[in-house]
Image (cartoon, rainbow, N blue to C red):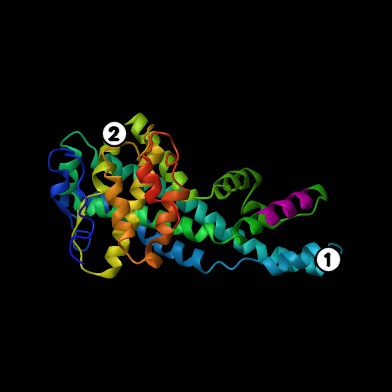
Amino acid sequence: MGNLIKVLTRDIDNNAGNFFLDFENAQPTEAERAVWEQVNEVLMEALAILDDLQSYNGAGEEIRQAIQNPSEDQVQERAWAAVVPLVGKLKKFYEFSLRLEGSLHGLLKALTSARCSPTQHLEQEQALARQFAEILHFTLRFDELKMTNPAIQNDFSYYRRTLNRMRINNVAAEEENEVNNELANRMSLFYANATPMLKTLSDATTKFVSDVSEKALHCLRIIAPISYRFASEDTVSFCLRVMVGVIILYDYVHPAGAFVKSSKIEMKGCIKVLKDQPQSSVEGLLNALRYTTKHLNDETTSKQIKNMLQVN
């Protein structure tokens, strides 16, 4: 499909739009290897996290039976036995988000160090840039799966209600040590968000920009519309998802957002690239721009961009 995402920025670093990120063949150099290996461990776990989330079926039937038959101990026990291991999975997902946050910090630190410009970092450290893209790809995929699975919040709400009732009735629960009340409160805040992984990444990036370096914003501006070299359909899908992920992340981190002209992201070109693909393959990504960004409906967003993202 050639250079599908050849949408150039407005002269960022003079040549930011004129080099390729080779996402199919990038390999770590010796200078990148230490950071790359640390992040790679987390990304390998990310694959298993997505598999677990995709196969998460919930305990809906057991919970319904328990609610309809509150006085039947056997039914209550069945529901509790079904929910507890699922909450263990939800705990694993939440704890993984914290490790992912640490990996993102390490990558941003490496890609924004003072030794060269953000563009030069991306040119010279393409394996790390690939890992940053993989984190964004994972984030959007995780949140897509979470948003379409109401069982996650239903299971966790039932777990918390039942645990509180057991405490009131002085019923021992060995599983309380698995997810104690303090951890349950943090997990509840995490899962209450429509896009919890994106929230984790945007908060971490905002903190990094505030505490360490605004060069992180520069990196996002460069990656969003850059030219990618690839051949396979899988890599096309990967790059489109990364492009959308960068736009959303930038929109949360930058005070003015990604849709204003001063953001230097060629938003019209990015949207056009998406709309040039088969609708079935990109509708989820277009919806992510429509419904999970922060500044799309601001007055500073041009009518043309708003019209491009309207549902037909």
Question: Mark 2, residues whose alpha carbon is within 10 Å: few (<14), some, or many (≥20)?
Answer: few
Q: Write down the residue under mark 2.
A: 262
Which stretch appears magenta?
157-167
Residue 166 within the magenta-colored segment of the rendering: yes
- Give whichever of discs 1 and 2 has the lower sequence position: 1
Q: Tell me if residue 191 comes above or below residue 105 in the rendering.
A: below
Residue at point 30%, 47% (across, down):
268
Residue at point 41%, 54% (across, down):
139
| Residues at marks 1 and 2 touching, judged by CB atoms closer than 8 Å | no
Measuring from the top left, give residue 141's x and y in whole percent: 43, 59
Q: Residue furthest top?
A: 211
Measuring from the top left, give residue 229's x and y in whole percent: 18, 60
| Whether residue 102 can be seen here | no
Question: Mark 1, residues whose alpha carbon is within 10 Å: few (<14), some, or many (≥20)?
Answer: few
Q: Quadrant of residue 200?
A: top left
Q: Nearer the viewer, residue 142 or 81?
A: 142
| Whether residue 149 can be seen here | yes
Q: Tell me if residue 11 comes above or below residue 39 in the rendering.
A: above
Q: Amino acid at mark 1?
A: Asn
Residue 238 within the magenta-colored segment of the rendering: no
Q: Write down the residue under mark 1.
A: 69
